[in-house]
Structure formats: structure tokens, C-alpha cells
Amino acid sequence: MEQMLGFIANVGFPIVLSVYLLVRIEGKLDDLTRSIQELARAVAGGN
């Protein structure tokens, strides 16, 4: 049982942290993509 808890502590935390960071980065990438598209329209004379 102690080995299982140690495994969860050693592997579970990095997995949870990685998922959290990926979710946060995804939102920022969506915002960046939208901004680039708006910039492209502005440069092309759309707005």
C-alpha cells in the first residue's frame, strides 16, 4: 500500500500539473489565434 501511495505521489502530481498547464495554455493560444486573425483583417483593410 505504501508503494502505491508513493507511486501516486511521484507520478500523479506531475500528471495533474501538466494537464492544468495544458488547459491554461490552450485558452491563451485561442486568444492569440483570434488576435492574429483580427490583425490580418486589419492589415488587409477589412476593419
Image (cartoon, rainbow, N blue to C red):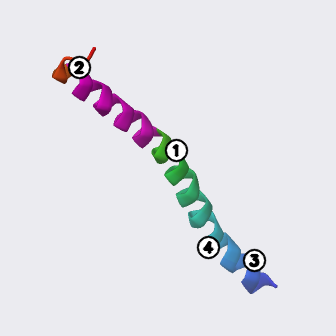
Earlier in the chain: of badge 2 and badge 4, it is: 4
Q: Nearer the viewer, mark 2 or mark 4?
A: 2
Taking depth in this image into account, of 25 and 14 the one nearest to the observer is: 25
Quarter of the picture containing the N terminus is bottom right
Q: Nearer the viewer, mark 2 or mark 3?
A: 2
Q: Nearer the viewer, mark 4 or mark 1?
A: 1
Task: Tell me the tag on residue 32.
Answer: none
Cβ atoms at labels 4 and 1 below 8 Å apart: no
Q: Which residues are magenta?
A: 28-42
Quarter of the picture containing the C terminus is top left
- x and y, in percent, of residue 14 in the image: 56, 65
Mark 1 and mark 2: Cα distance apart in space: 28 Å
Q: Which residue is mark 1?
A: 24
Earlier in the chain: of badge 1 and badge 2, it is: 1
| Residue kind at label 2, given as amino acid type | Ala
Q: Which residue is mark 4?
A: 10
Earlier in the chain: of badge 2 and badge 3, it is: 3
Describe the element under mark 1 as helix, strand or loop: helix
| Residue kind at label 4, given as amino acid type | Asn
State whether the magenta stretch is mostly helix, strand or loop. Answer: helix
Earlier in the chain: of badge 4 and badge 3, it is: 3
